[in-house]
Image (cartoon, helix red, strand yellow):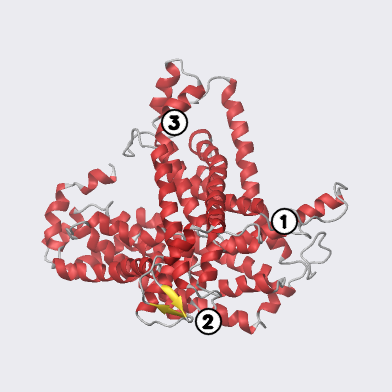
């Protein structure tokens, strides 16, 4: 039975009044979070864009000067165009790789589907810094590519053409995009009833015609969602261009971060952020307009390729080509990560091939690095606070949204998840303005607030999804037997949603441990571990960074495995 049908279960109607609290009391914390964390900071961003700087300080005099400056700046429009072009092109390249992979896993592969899916998603859970930096080990002047070309005699000396350019930024963005598109389209492929494909084939349609008239119309909306997610993640990324793009790969995110940093021109940076948000919204609107929804399925239909989509030898050929394509993309996703692990055991201080000596020296040196240990300690403090806040608040909001009949509940839910849909650099700016309004100084408290703004919705959505799958009669029976709301929650409801809560907490831990783009705006001199590593890579590389990334990668994988295990138990 689909979720939509379960929510309309008559038992839910009878239990809701028993669980309902005073409407105003239930809405108060939810609306407070919505106003303080979401609405006011965004309104502050818009308001700041109409101010100006006078003698190094904000002058509260309304003006259109920032937008006039942007309108007349040819350099700004070129930078905006290149930023949107980089992200959109990379997202489409990621779709070219991920869309066929999703089809192969969902419709062609007959064994180990879970393993094939997890292999694509694992890089998504690895540190973003690790994934981006690993490309420097491949494309750098002393990297793997140059070493292979010099050794083979194709070039005489290492080339600088492979790194610090626009193509490298697009390649790295495409690398980041693949898992987002894959997971968005996989479920759509799985939900296509086999009977539709069989009917198309029985009617004499070719495989291409079946794709155009059956498969594509039912999956293009999910593809649009995947491309949009990848676009949102990359368009506000100023870390990747700083690490692999150089001057030629500069994006608008770099300009925005500079205006709130060294340039100290917040109004101009806010105006640039507003223009970026408007531009992103326009592009996403076009993407969804080009990929309308035509036909949906509730999830009750039989899935899986129980009958081959192509007759005769075409099945074997499709399976072979799909397997080869899948293996190539997997190699593309994992080669940079494995290379970094190998370098973490290399004895040389230069990241170059061939590796002549293997050692654990860099791991041992971490124990004596006081700056790193201090940054790691701050990361642990921030992560614990973020998880505590996000788990408590997210679970509470999920309960309120599910059991209370709030006016505009759907709109409130969407607004609460708004930070997840904002480009990282813009969210960082918004959180800076929001915390400035209430005079919270730079440091760990700001970092906790900023990270909680996007970690809390993750927990809320996981718990809310679990609540919507529950049988309402269980809670009704508890209340009818005399238990109050607290006991019913503790002994009936909580055990049923505990898996989703723990899953959200563990996933929140991985998000907090890896966060750079928002925290870099908020932490100030109190660097967390990802920020410390980022600054080390910008101002002075040491081989110990490879060891740090390897440890972080293994730790994130362990946390995600635990989260998935708890989530399966919670859904069981």
Looking at the image, is mark 1 or mark 2 earlier in the sequence? 1
User: Few, some or many C-alpha atoms within 10 Å of disc 3 (few <14, some 14-19, many ≥20)?
Assistant: some
Q: Quadrant of residue 329?
A: top right
Q: Quadrant of the N terminus?
A: top left
Q: Secondary structure at mark 1?
A: helix
Q: Quadrant of residue 4?
A: top left
Q: Residue at x 49, y 50 (%)?
A: 180
Q: Position of residue 201 (x, y in %)?
A: 45, 19
Residue at the disc numbered 3: 215
**Could you tell whether 282 is left or right of 104 in the image?**
left
Q: Residue at x 31, y 39 (%)?
A: 298
Front disc: 3 or 2? 2
Q: Is residue 127 above or below residue 278?
A: below
- What's the mark number on residue 526? 2
Q: Nearer the viewer, residue 501 or 175?
A: 175
Q: How far apart in space, not on screen, are marks 3 and 1 (Cα)? A: 37 Å
Q: How far apart in space, not on screen, are marks 3 and 2 (Cα)? A: 51 Å
User: Few, some or many C-alpha atoms within 10 Å of disc 2 (few <14, some 14-19, many ≥20)?
Assistant: some
**Could you tell whether 549 is left or right of 179 in the image?**
right
Q: How far apart in space, not on screen, are marks 1 and 2 (Cα)? A: 32 Å
Q: Residue at x 47, y 54 (%)?
A: 232
Q: Secondary structure at mark 3?
A: helix
Q: Secondary structure at mark 2?
A: loop
Residue at the disc numbered 1: 138
Q: Nearer the viewer, residue 155 or 413?
A: 155
Looking at the image, is mark 3 or mark 2 earlier in the sequence? 3
Q: Position of residue 96 (x, y in %)?
A: 56, 40
């Amino acid at each position: 039975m689909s979720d939509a049908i379960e929510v309309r279960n008559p038992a839910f109607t009878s239990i809701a009044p028993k669980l309902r609290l005073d409407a105003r009391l239930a809405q108060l914390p939810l609306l407070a979070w919505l106003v303080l964390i979401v609405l006011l900071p965004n309104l502050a961003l818009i308001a700041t864009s109409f101010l100006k700087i006078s003698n190094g300080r904000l002058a509260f005099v309304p003006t259109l000067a920032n937008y006039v400056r942007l309108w007349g700046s040819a350099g700004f429009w070129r930078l905006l165009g290149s930023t949107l072009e980089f992200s959109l092109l990379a997202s489409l390249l990621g779709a070219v790789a991920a869309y066929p992979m999703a089809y192969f896993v969902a419709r062609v592969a007959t064994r180990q589907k879970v393993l094939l899916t997890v292999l694509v998603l694992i890089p998504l859970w690895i540190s973003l810094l690790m994934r981006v930096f690993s490309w420097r080990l491949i494309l750098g002047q002393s990297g793997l590519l140059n070493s292979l070309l010099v050794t083979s005699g194709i070039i005489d000396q290492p080339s600088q053409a492979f790194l610090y350019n626009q193509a490298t930024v697009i390649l790295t963005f495409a690398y980041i995009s693949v898992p987002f598109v894959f997971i968005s389209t996989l479920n759509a492929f799985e939900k296509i009833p086999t009977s539709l494909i069989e009917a198309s084939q029985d009617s004499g349609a070719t495989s291409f015609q079946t794709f155009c008239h059956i498969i594509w119309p039912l999956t293009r909306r999910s593809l649009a969602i995947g491309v949009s997610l990848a676009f949102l993640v990359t368009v506000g990324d100023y870390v990747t261009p700083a690490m692999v793009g150089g001057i030629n790969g500069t994006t608008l995110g770099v300009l925005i971060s500079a205006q709130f940093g060294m340039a100290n021109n917040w109004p101009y940076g806010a105006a640039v952020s507003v223009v970026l948000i408007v531009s992103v919204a326009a592009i996403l609107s076009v993407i969804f307009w080009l990929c309308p929804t035509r036909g949906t399925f509730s999830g009750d239909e039989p899935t899986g390729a129980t009958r081959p989509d192509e007759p005769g030898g075409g099945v074997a050929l499709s399976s072979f080509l799909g397997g080869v394509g899948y293996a190539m993309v997997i190699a593309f996703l994992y080669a940079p990560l494995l290379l970094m692990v190998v370098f973490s055991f290399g004895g040389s201080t230069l990241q170059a091939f061939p590796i002549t000596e293997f050692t654990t020296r860099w791991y041992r040196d971490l124990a004596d690095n006081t700056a790193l240990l201090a940054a790691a300690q701050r990361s642990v403090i921030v992560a614990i606070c973020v998880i505590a806040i996000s788990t408590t608040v997210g679970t509470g909001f999920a309960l309120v949204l599910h059991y209370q009949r709030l006016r505009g509940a759907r709109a409130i839910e969407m607004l609460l998840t708004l930070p997840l849909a904002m480009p990282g650099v813009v969210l960082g700016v918004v959180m800076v303005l929001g915390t400035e309004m209430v005079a919270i100084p730079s440091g760990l408290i700001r970092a906790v607030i900023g990270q909680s703004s996007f970690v809390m919705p993750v927990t809320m959505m996981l718990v809310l999804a679990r609540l919507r799958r529950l049988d309402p009669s269980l809670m009704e029976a508890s209340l009818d037997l005399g238990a109050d709301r607290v006991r019913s929650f503790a002994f009936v409801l909580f055990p049923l949603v505990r898996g989703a809560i723990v899953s959200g907490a563990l996933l929140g831990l991985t998000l907090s441990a890896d966060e750079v783009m928002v925290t870099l705006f908020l932490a100030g001199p109190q660097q967390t571990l990802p920020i410390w590593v980022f600054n080390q890579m910008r101002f002075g590389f040491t081989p110990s960074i490879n060891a740090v990334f390897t440890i972080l990668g293994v730790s994130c994988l362990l946390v995600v495995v635990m989260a998935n295990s708890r989530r399966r138990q919670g859904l069981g």
